[in-house]
């Protein structure tokens, strides 16, 4: 038998456990040529999945109701009639939230357990690392000596963005929601300064204080009032990489923020939405760079690993309360 | 004697006549070597000047209180001890709101009355035309067949942007505030469609209807609710040229609008503030192109000409009620 998680309801506001349903099905009995059977090992839960649970027009089609949800997954090949993959191989790719599933191998990559822990292929050597590296370099266009502010800095992408910023010679400021996270940004990830938005009354003043030369690059994972506050410190020709807007994803009405137009005009500044899949032709170069920095211990990462297939919906929901440090992963 | 207009108060909200003061001074009696005496012929009043009347940080320093305001001016040389300019020449440049003034020629360009009407050098062959051409081409990066929406479309810059859009093979939609302006956009400037925001209840639906293939480029002069409505129709990789935000300039509190981040992320879209002076190295190429199109009758323009030096403040204030069609100019 195989357990599957399907989308039961399109969430209103913050997703609830009742928006998900566990379904048990019989396994496909036999494999045809080219197919293989996969056993799920790690599942990545990510804020962007929230968007796919709504039926609004977006860059990827929405999940269908009563169909399995899918996300980044590491799986083990437990039987194979596919020439490219053999029993015992590990693969990464976009796969269903199922304990086991059959695949023809399309879109899957073999991953090497000897080179890095398997879960790293969902994080720093997967979409997380690619998003951080390509968002920062392709839109942020960093120049050594500039100031970078990262929101959602203790999250999976944010913590990598900050470290890459330091490697590239930037002054790096992180914004996160607990003192423990701020401490981690500074001690573990090498950020120059951090701001706890939950205990800071005047975010505008706090940002101005830690960014005395203004903000040249803003890597934004959150949107909302935090991003409003950053606007007051942006420099001429500032680049704002809009990678996510987690503070707005669960809004039930269209959220409002400070009008950005006057800030953009005054500073000849840029805001650009970033989706990593638009930069697929740069993945090999980015992977090479990330692997190199990881091997040289210039990059480190944090994971929040939750155990058990049944915990996938909870782990996903917890993202919106910032319960994760770094990449949130479910180990099956 | 020379009349001068100085900034008496920093306006709160919409500028009032009492924010300006007329001062009469004696002329500088004699010219030293390199100087010339100019008599003002045309004065350009533009929305961006509102920003310089506040003391907020911006891309240009604010006007000083009790000092003359300046803007784009066409003046006649009435006496000269400068080798570059002789009596009878006409010049354009950033000059004070004075009936006569002395200049050493710095930053002034000679303009040719035989090639185009003098006032055109404040408009289509001046900052207006350069702003339209460079904003559209450098940030909008138009590709024939795409859809362009222009807000403030009947204004000085907007009406030129739309015409250049047509020359470059775009579907062009203009947003303006009266039926008369919409008619002018379509008949005089060749726009494909127009929307009167004052009589349209559902701007979002109206934009979707005239842009059935979505919006690839938005040339924004206004900000506020009109720009909010456009967001719902933007296509993947849309470019929004943020050239001005006239609807927000007189706000006395920081204005709010729909949060743009979710729209930018969903569509991998870009918003970028545009200031023409950042593109000075492209002025010669742009001027050549604009002059060529003007000579070929591919471009036309509208001016609202107000007569009398004393009317400068009124003409400026009228901009914020959309009383101008095309470039607002005061003839002295």
Image: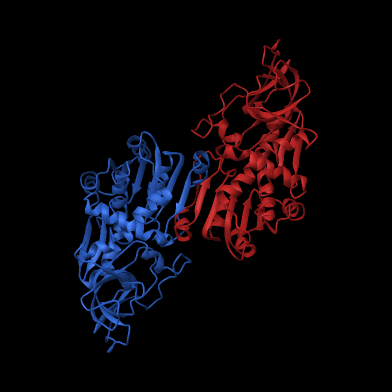
Chain colours: A blue, B red
Residue A119 percent location from the top left of the image? 23, 64
Mark yes or no: residue B329 visible.
yes
Using the image as rendered, state which of residue B270 and residue B52 is in the foreground: B270
Q: Residue at horizontal 32%, vertical 41%?
A: A169
Q: In this view, which residue lies farthest toward the right? A: B114
Residue A158 percent location from the top left of the image? 31, 52
Residue A93 percent location from the top left of the image? 32, 70
Using the image as rendered, state which of residue A179 and residue A302 is in the foreground: A302
Q: Quadrant of residue A213?
A: top left
Q: Is residue A66 above or below residue B256?
A: below
Residue B275 percent location from the top left of the image? 56, 40
Quadrant placement of the N terminus of chain B: top right
Using the image as rendered, state which of residue B248 and residue A234 is in the foreground: A234
Quadrant placement of the C terminus of chain B: top right
Number of marks present in the image shown: 0
Q: Quadrant of residue B19?
A: top right
């Amino acid at each position: 038998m195989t357990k599957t998680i399907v989308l039961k309801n399109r969430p209103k506001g913050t997703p609830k456990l009742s928006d998900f349903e566990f379904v048990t099905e019989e396994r496909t009995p036999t494999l045809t040529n080219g197919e293989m059977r996969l056993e799920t090992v790690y599942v990545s839960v990510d804020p962007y999945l929230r968007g796919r649970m709504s039926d609004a027009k977006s860059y990827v089609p929405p999940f269908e109701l009563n169909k399995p949800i899918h996300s980044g997954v590491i799986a083990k090949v437990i039987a194979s009639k596919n020439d490219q993959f053999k029993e015992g191989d590990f693969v990464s790719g976009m796969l269903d939230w199922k304990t086991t599933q059959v695949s023809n191998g399309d879109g899957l990559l073999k991953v090497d357990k000897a080179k890095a822990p398997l879960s790293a292929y969902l994080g720093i050597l997967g979409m997380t690392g690619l998003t951080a590296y390509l968002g920062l370099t392709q839109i942020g266009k960093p120049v050594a000596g500039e100031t970078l502010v990262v929101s959602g800095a203790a999250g999976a992408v944010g913590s990598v963005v900050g470290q890459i910023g330091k490697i590239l010679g930037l002054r790096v400021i992180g914004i996160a929601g607990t003192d423990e996270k701020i401490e981690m940004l500074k001690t573990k990830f090498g950020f120059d300064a951090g701001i706890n938005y939950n205990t800071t009354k005047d975010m505008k003043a706090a940002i101005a204080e830690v960014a005395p030369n203004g903000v040249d690059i803003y890597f934004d994972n959150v949107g909302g009032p935090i991003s409003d506050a950053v606007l007051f410190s942006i420099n001429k020709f500032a680049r704002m990489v809009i990678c996510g807007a987690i503070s707005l994803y669960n809004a039930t009405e269209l959220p409002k923020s400070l009008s950005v137009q006057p800030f953009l005009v005054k500073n000849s500044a840029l805001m650009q939405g970033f989706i990593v899949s638009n930069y697929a032709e740069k993945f090999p170069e980015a992977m090479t760079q990330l692997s190199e920095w990881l091997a040289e211990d210039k990059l480190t990462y944090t994971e929040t690993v939750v155990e058990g297939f049944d915990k996938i919906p909870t782990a996903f929901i917890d993202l919106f309360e910032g319960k994760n440090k770094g990449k949130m992963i479910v180990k099956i």
